[in-house]
């Protein structure tokens, strides 16, 4: 099974959309659990921690794999144009 550039771009886009949704929902406020304060008193520590960790994991996924996916897509696209196709 060969990787296609579209697959990497699609993966990067999904991560970007998930992070954008988390940001729009205000999950950034819950990252305060990392310094020992609760993000929301009515929700409690458990839910605040889950929401904060969700935001942090999506942020890390945005910063680390997304650029790698986009570079891989670009390299595969260039490679497909440069490398001649062999037809049997």
Image: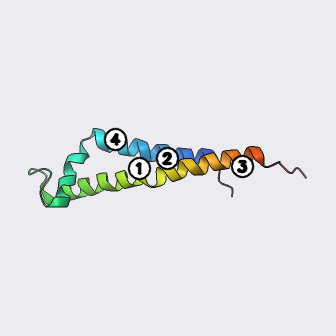
Find residue 2 and report its horizontal and vertical position in percent: 68, 55
Report how far apart the C-alphas of labels 3 and 2 lie in the structure.
Answer: 20 Å
Mark 3 or mark 4: whose residue is earlier in sequence: 4
Report how far apart the C-alphas of labels 1 and 4 lie in the structure.
Answer: 12 Å
Residue found at x 15% / y 51%? 39
The reply to whether callout 3 and callout 2 are in contact (CB within 8 Å) is: no
Mark 1 or mark 4: whose residue is earlier in sequence: 4
Mark 2 or mark 4: whose residue is earlier in sequence: 2
Q: Which residue is mark 3?
A: 79
Report how far apart the C-alphas of labels 2 and 4 lie in the structure.
Answer: 14 Å
Q: Nearer the viewer, mark 2 or mark 4?
A: 2
Q: Which residue is mark 2?
A: 12
The reply to whether callout 1 and callout 4 are in contact (CB within 8 Å) is: no
Report how far apart the C-alphas of labels 1 and 3 lie in the structure.
Answer: 25 Å
Q: Which residue is mark 4?
A: 21
Q: Residue furthest left?
A: 41
Q: Which element carries disc 2, helix, strand or loop?
A: helix
Q: Which element carries disc 3, helix, strand or loop?
A: helix
Q: Which residue is mark 1?
A: 62
Find residue 86 and report its horizontal and vertical position in percent: 86, 51
Residue found at x 22% / y 53%? 31
- Mark 3 neighbour density, 10 Å: few (under 14) some (14–19) many (20 or more): few
């Amino acid at each position: 099974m060969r990787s296609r550039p579209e697959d990497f771009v699609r993966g990067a886009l999904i991560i970007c959309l998930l992070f954008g949704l988390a940001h729009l929902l205000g999950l950034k406020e819950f990252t305060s659990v990392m310094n020992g304060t609760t993000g929301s008193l009515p929700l409690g520590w458990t839910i605040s921690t889950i929401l904060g960790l969700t935001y942090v994991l999506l942020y890390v996924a945005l910063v680390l794999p997304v650029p790698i996916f986009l570079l891989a897509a670009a390299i595969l696209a260039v490679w497909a144009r440069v490398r001649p196709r062999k037809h049997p």
